[in-house]
Image (spheres, helix red, strand yellow):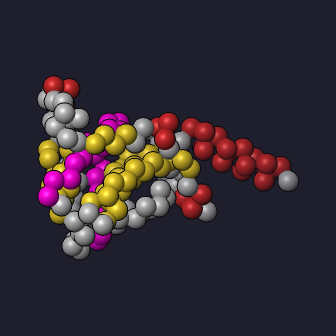
Amino acid sequence: MRVWLFLLLIMFAGINSGCLRSLGTHAIQCAMVGEEKICFVREVWGFNGENLSLTTDDNVCHKPSSENDYVSDRMRGDSVIFAKVVDGKFYVYAVPMEAPKNPFPVEVILEPYNPATYFDRDFIKDGYQKFDLNEEKMTWCFNDIF
């Protein structure tokens, strides 16, 4: 009994500190590109574990796949992404992402993230939608725990 209590205490401490890789937190925001739903999914774990994916899966607990999703592990704290649809193409202003090995259902144009000009640009005026994947919008995924 004491062993189980001790293990539960360690698990609870890991969840609250975010120190265990398998206990991530997730956020999602989606947009329609024509008839296709495209979603940004952010996963954060530990002190500096973080990734961002662009996927057609609208499950917040989706695990990114280099086969089918755009994936980046370089988000590093910037939880705001800007994107817009122009002539059926999805323009994304975010950290660099690797293109999937398989064809993606919409054409994605990745615009390079430039921290030096980030605050000088009026994205909303340029027709971009703000995707805010900050910590207040995150949820736990139990499939990470079990």
Instruction: Tell me where residue 65 sits by quadrant.
Output: bottom left
Q: Is residue 66 left or right of residue 13?
A: left
View extreme (bottom): residue: 102
Residue 41 pos. (x, y %)? 39, 53
Q: Is residue 100 left or right of residue 79?
A: left
Residue 119 pos. (x, y %)? 20, 26
Number of marks: 0
Q: Is residue 8 left or right of residue 101?
A: right
- Magenta residues span 67-87
Is 38 colored magenta in this rendering? Answer: no
Is 73 colored magenta in this rendering? Answer: yes
Q: What residue is rendered at 47% in x and 49% in y?
A: 26
Q: Is residue 19 visible?
A: no
Q: What residue is rendered at 52% in x and 55% in y?
A: 22
Q: Is residue 105 visible?
A: yes
Residue 20 pos. (x, y %)? 53, 48
Instruction: Tell me where residue 71 sits by quadrant.
Output: bottom left
Q: Is residue 91 above or below residue 81?
A: below
Q: What residue is rendered at 16% in x and 30% in y?
A: 121
